[in-house]
């Protein structure tokens, strides 16, 4: 049986976070069960792009500070690593993301090492899925003695929810991530690639920053939700199962996690998961908003209708009044569907991966319906099945 620890924590006050982390870890045997003095410990954060910690789009810098202080006290070398999504002038914005998030400052103050996965080299890995022969992952994941996954509790416009299982996507360096979005536009197939990453990596511990979460149009354009939770587990799928239950979802409703379930990456049945800490069952996050595509908790009652009537789909559109002409959307589109000059999206090329929406720093990429009747029908069904 897998264990998921849920701790109530209402702020990023360093002392409070450390206290909650330490008491939570005691329920898994204590830090000493995972950490030995002198270890090189890699903290794999969620650093999707150049976003401040206050946006709830990235693992909060103060959350990372607390964990780094714990590990430093145990005489470990601490690495903080990730590779951001998207591109600016043909380059992944990872270095800028470390600065904007505050993580560079945390590393400097505490003597940790920033690992920009775009610059650290890769290791070739074998894969089980049929989308290719090899997978190339950031070398530090294999050089570290211990890897701790630090996902952010967030919604995702394309995948509904993103957490511990999805956070490993950042182990693919640089612009290669966009190639996988192009190669695997279907969430189920994309999930197979995530399962391959987990099977190639030895990630011992998963600690989710849910003190503030992102609701609505995540993973970058949503709103901050004060969830006040820290989730800890050795099982990434069990952690995601519990987190999704907290926002009213069944893990089976999240296609990106199907492969992880099928390939036994972890437990996905609540009866096989022991919830410990400040709760003995996943607490409901009241009023938490799902993405527009999924914001009815009873969506299964009309999902067939949405599949049949294609005009019910939302599509990304660029609001030129908000656009800053940074061209992040243009350069990050894996199928080059966005006109650089006009910012018009060619929907005959668009694969609905939502990279443009996900990576826009200014919330200029909005999800809109082309058909007014479709919008009215969607509102009717959402209201009917609330």
Image: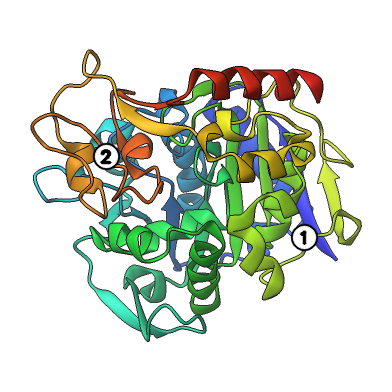
Q: Position of residue 145 (x, y in %)?
A: 46, 72
**Residue that appears at 29% across and 32% down:** 360
Q: Which quarter of the picture shows residue 142?
A: bottom left
> In the figure, is residue 53 to the left or right of 260?
left
Q: Is residue 323 left or right of residue 243?
A: left
Q: CA distance from mark 1 to mark 2?
A: 33 Å
Q: Vertically, is 353 above or below 132?
A: above
As helix, strand or loop, the secondary structure at mark 2 comes to helix
What is the number of callouts on the image? Answer: 2
Horizontal arrangement in the rendering, residue 361 relative to residue 10 (left or right): left
For residue 314, which numbered disc appears in the image? none
Query: Which one is in front, 296 or 136?
Result: 296
Q: Is residue 100 visible?
A: yes
Residue 75 visible somewhere in the drawing: no
Q: What is the quadrant of residue 57 in the picture?
A: top left
Q: Residue 293 versus residue 194: which sits nearer the camera?
A: 293
Sequence-first tag of 1 and 2: 2
**How far from the left and from the top, in percent, is residue 10?**
65, 22
| In this rendering, the label closer to the viewer, 1 or 2 | 1
Question: Would you place residue 70 above or below residue 264 in this image?
Answer: above
Q: Position of residue 51 (x, y in %)?
A: 33, 31
**Which SS class for mark 1?**
loop
Residue 94 is left or right of residue 40, and the answer is left
Give me the disc on residue 268: 1
Circle 2 crowding by C-alpha within 10 Å: few under 14, some 14–19, many from 20: many
Mark 1 surroundings within 10 Å by alpha-carbon count, few (fewer than 14), some (14 through 19), many (20 or more): many
**Mark 2 — residue?**
97
């Amino acid at each position: 049986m897998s264990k998921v620890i849920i701790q109530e924590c209402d702020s990023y006050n360093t002392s409070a976070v450390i206290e909650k982390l330490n008491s939570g870890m005691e329920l898994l045997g204590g830090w000493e069960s995972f950490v030995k003095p002198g270890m090189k410990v890699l903290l794999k954060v969620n650093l999707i792009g150049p976003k401040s910690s206050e946006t709830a789009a990235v693992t909060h810098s103060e959350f990372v500070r607390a964990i780094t202080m714990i590990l430093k006290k145990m005489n470990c070398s601490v690495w903080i690593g990730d590779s951001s999504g998207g591109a600016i002038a043909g380059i992944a914005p990872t270095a800028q993301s470390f600065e904007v998030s505050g993580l560079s400052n945390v590393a400097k103050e505490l003597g940790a090492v920033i690992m920009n996965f775009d610059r650290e080299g890769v290791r070739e890995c074998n894969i089980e899925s049929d989308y290719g022969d090899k997978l190339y992952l950031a070398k530090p994941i294999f050089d570290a003695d211990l890897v701790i996954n630090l996902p952010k509790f967030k919604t995702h416009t394309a995948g509904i929810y993103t957490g511990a299982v999805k956070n490993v996507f950042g182990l693919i360096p640089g612009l290669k991530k966009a190639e996988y979005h192009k190669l695997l536009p279907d969430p189920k197939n994309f999930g197979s690639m995530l399962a391959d990453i987990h099977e190639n990596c030895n990630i011992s511990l998963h600690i989710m920053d849910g003190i503030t979460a992102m609701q609505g149009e995540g993973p970058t354009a949503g709103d901050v939700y004060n969830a006040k939770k820290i989730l800890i587990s050795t099982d990434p799928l069990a952690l995601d199962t519990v987190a999704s239950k907290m926002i009213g979802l069944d893990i089976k409703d999240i296609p990106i996690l199907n492969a992880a379930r099928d390939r036994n990456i972890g437990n996905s049945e609540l009866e096989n998961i022991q919830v410990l800490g400040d709760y003995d069952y996943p607490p409901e996050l009241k009023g938490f908003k799902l993405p527009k595509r999924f914001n009815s908790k009873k969506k299964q009652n009309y999902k067939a209708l949405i599949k049949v009537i294609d005009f019910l789909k939302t599509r990304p559109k660029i609001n030129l009044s908000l656009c800053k002409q940074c061209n992040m959307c243009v350069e990050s589109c894996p199928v080059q569907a966005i006109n650089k000059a006009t910012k018009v999206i060619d929907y005959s090329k668009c694969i609905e991966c939502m990279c443009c929406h996900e990576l826009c720093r200014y919330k200029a990429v909005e999800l809109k319906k082309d058909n007014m009747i479709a919008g009215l029908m969607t509102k009717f069904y959402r209201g009917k099945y609330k």
